[in-house]
């Protein structure tokens, strides 16, 4: 096998390398960061769900969290429904 026989495949290989560094790798990093955030959730964290519901975690287990969204109103969500943890807001 010589270099001339690989000639037609070089653009295809370069295209794959570009896609890997521009699309696949950043997505893997983002997914790893999200998994770490979901793993580190704890009682008392202020969170926003994927649907936009804001609340404070009152109970948490492996798959379900209970959010307090208002006085005497707790909603249960899948743990994966949490979009982000919100830092304390200064008043």
Image (spheres, rainbow, N blue to C red):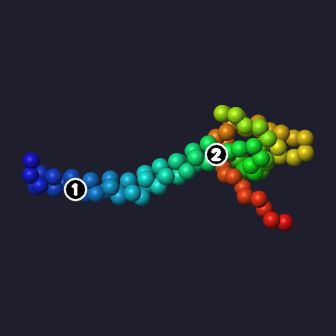
Which of these two is toward me, 84 or 7? 84
Q: Residue at x 9, y 52 (%)?
A: 2
Q: Which residue is drawn at 83% across and 39% down?
A: 74
Q: How far apart are marks 1 and 2 (CA)?
A: 44 Å
Q: According to the image, label 2 marks what residue?
A: 40
Looking at the image, is mark 1 or mark 2 earlier in the sequence? 1
Q: Which residue is drawn at 47% across and 55% down?
A: 26
Which of these two is toward me, 21 or 46? 46
Look at the image and tell me in which quarter the C terminus lies.
Answer: bottom right
- Crowd band around label 1 with a 10 angstrom C-alpha radius: few (<14), some (14–19), many (20+): few
Q: Assign a secondary structure to mark 2.
A: loop
Which of these two is toward me, 5 or 44? 44
Provide residue 47's location: percent of width, then percent of height: 73, 50
Q: Say whether residue 47 is left or right of residue 17.
A: right
Q: Residue at x 87, y 46 (%)?
A: 70
Q: Which of marks 1 and 2 is in front?
A: 2
For residue 57, which quarter of the picture? top right
């Amino acid at each position: 096998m010589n270099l001339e026989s690989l000639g037609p495949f070089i653009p295809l290989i370069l295209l794959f390398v570009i896609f890997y560094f521009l699309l696949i790798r950043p997505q893997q990093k983002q997914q790893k960061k999200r998994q770490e955030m979901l793993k580190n959730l704890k009682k008392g964290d202020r969170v926003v769900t994927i649907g936009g519901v804001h609340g404070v975690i009152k109970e948490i287990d492996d798959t379900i969290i209970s959010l307090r969204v208002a006085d005497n109103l707790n909603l249960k969500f899948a743990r994966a429904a949490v979009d982000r943890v919100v830092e304390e807001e200064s008043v």
